[in-house]
Amino acid sequence: MIKIKMKVEDIFDIEGKVFLVTGAYGLIGSNLCHFLDENNATVVAVGKKEEKLKDLKAATIFKADISNEGDVISLWRSLEKEFQNHGDQCERNISHVQTRVQ
């Protein structure tokens, strides 16, 4: 077996980019939040239980049930306000979702 020692920054740069992680306090979500934080990304953690979200390494947490349309609309409106000046890609993505939500 050949072991390859490679870091994410060897493949692509995620520093300063915003990542939305749904189901953030689950096994995969919590590990993803930790990985993104360790690589200097901005993490937005989303989940149904706010008390579980508080234990995560995340810049921002949102209590939301993504199966609930009202929660999703509220989430995107909050993201738009919080990250409106966070770069062109974020703005394009939010604008794209916004046209579908309104």
Image (spheres, rainbow, N blue to C red):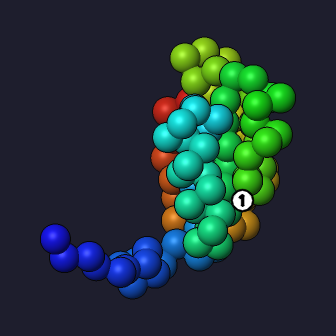
Task: Identify the residue shown where x is 49% and y is 33%.
Answer: 100
Q: Quadrant of the C terminus?
A: top right
> Residue most toward the front?
1
Would you say residue 22 is visible in this rendering? Answer: no
The residue where tag 1 is placed is 84
The quarter holding residue 7 reads bottom left
Q: Amino acid at mark 1?
A: Gln
Task: Identify the residue shown where x is 55% and y is 49%.
Answer: 31
Q: Secondary structure at mark 1?
A: loop
Q: Is residue 64 above or below residue 53?
A: above
> Residue most toward the bottom?
10
For residue 10, side relative to residue 17 (left or right): left
Task: Identify the residue shown where x is 52% and y is 72%.
Answer: 14
For residue 92, side relative to residue 6 (left or right): right
Q: Residues within 10 Å of mark 1 (few under 14, many from 20)?
A: some
Q: Is residue 58 above or below residue 39?
A: above
Position of residue 87 measured from the top left corner of the image (x, y, whole percent): 62, 71
State the residue in front, 86 or 46: 46
